[in-house]
Amino acid sequence: MTANNKSQNSDAAGKLNSLSSCPSGSQLPDGTAAGCGSAVGSAAGSPAECAANTGNCRPGSPCGKPSNGRIISTAQSICPLCHKPIEAFYVEEKGQVHFIKECDEHGTFRTLAAEDAEAFVKWTAHPVVNIPPKKAITKGAQGGAALDDDKQNEPANPAAANTECPLHCGTCENHLQTACCVLIDLTGRCNQHCPYCFAKSDQDADRSGELSLEEIEAKYDLLLELGEERPFNIQLSGGEPTVRDDLPQIISMARQKGFEYVQINTNGRRLATEDGYVQKLKDAGASVIFMQFDGTRDDIYEALRGEPLLEIKKRAIRNCEKAGLGVTLVPTIVNGVNTDNIGEMMDFLVENVNVVKGIHFQPVSFFGRHPEEHSGDFPGRITMFGLLNQLEKQRPQFKADDMCPISTGHTLCCFYSTYIREPDGSVKCTLSARKKAEGVSCCDTAGIGTVQQSEGECCCGTPEPEADSCCCGTPELEADSCCCGQSISQQEALEIIRKDRDYVLDKWEIAVPQIQEDGAQGQCECSCCGADSQPETPEYSSSDDIMDMDEFLRYYRRNTFTVTGMAFQDVMNLDAERVKRCRVQVLSDDNRLIPFCAYNSIYRQ
């Protein structure tokens, strides 16, 4: 650790220990109680022990006792109540990490950041590569006011005085990562009413504000202008996008405009219940179905979605199999609701790997609609570290060490790995240790813009990285450089962008179903409908034994899958540095590209 970093942490420690007690009776925007009561899983006493649940305690301990926590790093956040930008701290307390911040008006707030401090520190040490957007849409200055469009050197109007990140999203010139995927909300309507819904969608929502086809076309044209040579990947969402009867036209329009990847974010209900509908989406050019799938038991769906839905999910997947349209399962993970079902979700994926090409875990974030009340943190919160621990505990073949963060984003936002199902039904991780050490983008473009190194070396040839630094001891990363300060050329940056977006496209291609390849009228291969999930293949003990290239490619295409996760932020744990590196952005009604977590925490109407 450099002397400068030691000084910063010393200053931060002083600020942390001087935080004032928080007033009782504050409420978050959703009406639940605020305050710094005991964090979930913390050793600091229960809310009942904490000044009769008034919240009058300092971060790190109940009832005003001094904190013994170690500050790992500082951050910029917002007050959950007034959204004023405030300083925050990642603090280690008895083996866990908490995110702690104080508003001078509303008091102190704390939330769980990691169940395992050692894993947190190791994880956040991974290298990153920053590739800023091609064009800024809004203007803002770190720690200062945004600049008026017509007066480049003067602050904007006084009503917009508090414009530190993330209050001027658009994206602005301080954003560090170009988008990989851009989300367009097509509707606020839905065919379900889920107790947990980040968009707060309703079955009887007004459709008067829905985008027309002409307005959607204009948004596509804007994205082509804002994007690099390889267009953004598109996510069509809502609400529930399939409630729009013109969804196939919207997909087709995107493909005709040149967007190579169009993802449909859906609960799967219409895909399950309407004959031929999935084929219409496939024929229109849909690339993948990103499907709500919270577990393999109906009690889970009743808790999270308000009704039993497992059979509907299975029918939707069967119909996707028939149409040759790949699926990724998207579970919202809520502590105490479906954390015990993670292993069975993985079993379901492996059994249906020909059509289910990945699972994308989303630890619950508390924005939109949710039933939880709290004093301090939300009881249902689980971090991606806790999720990975549960995954390995329930299915040891999926080790936490198999996973790594993406290098073209923030380390605390995602985890990623790739696997193959072996002929005997076991699984093998296909992401090498070297790739993880080099840094893996969401699309496996590690190595671009860096010197190729030998095993055990840093990219500059250093045999042993220093413990408290970037891999080469560099205290601070340059915005457009590798961790060792190597410049990334414009051409290399464009190549990373292209491979990022192409990989997202390619990994969802699935093998043509056996019933279509053979022209037979039999049942499909997926186990979700009770059919035999094992296609007819020669006997091999391992995929490594397959020597014929065509046969290997056929096997590989049918049996590879990804395990990923994204830890969205809410007003309790929003970190401006994570927002600045966000690669999933929402195209808002007023045509700004807003990082997903900031959009749902602050900007969504």
Image (cartoon, rainbow, N blue to C red):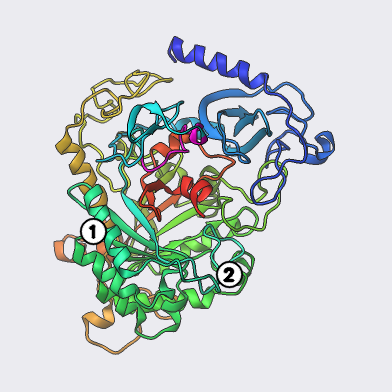
Q: Nearer the viewer, mark 1 or mark 2?
A: 2
Residue drawn 51% across the image and 25% down it:
73
Judge from the rendering whether residue 67 lies leftward or rightward of residue 581; answer left or right.
right
Question: Image quarter for residue 377?
Answer: top right
Q: In the image, is residue 552 above or below residue 128? A: below
Judge from the rendering whether residue 589 lies leftward or rightward of residue 23; answer left or right.
left
Report x, y in % for residue 327: 37, 67
Predominant secondary structure, magenta span: loop
Q: What kind of residue is marked 2?
A: His
**Could you say whether the residue bearing mark 2 is in a helix, strand or loop?**
loop
| Magenta part of the chain | 159-171
Find residue 545 and name its label.
Answer: 1
- The verdict on residue 149 being magenta is no
> What is the spatial separation of the Cα atoms under label 1 and label 2, in whole angstroms?
49 Å
Q: What kind of residue is marked 1?
A: Asp
Q: Which residue is mark 2?
A: 193
- Can residue 535 be seen here? The reply is no
Report x, y in % for residue 482: 27, 28
Farthest residue toward the right?
52
Find residue 527 and name its label.
Answer: none
Report x, y in % for residue 357: 35, 63
Residue drawn 41% across the image and 77% down it:
271
Which residue is more in the foreground, 404 or 243? Answer: 243
Which residue is more in the foreground, 585 or 119? Answer: 585
Q: Quadrant of the N terminus?
A: top left
- The verdict on residue 169 being magenta is yes
Judge from the rendering whether residue 298 lies leftward or rightward of residue 346; answer left or right.
right
Question: Image quarter for residue 414?
Answer: top left
Report x, y in % for residue 353: 36, 66
Q: In the image, is residue 96 above or below residue 243? A: above
- Can residue 435 be seen here? The reply is yes
Which residue is more in the foreground, 390 or 593? Answer: 593
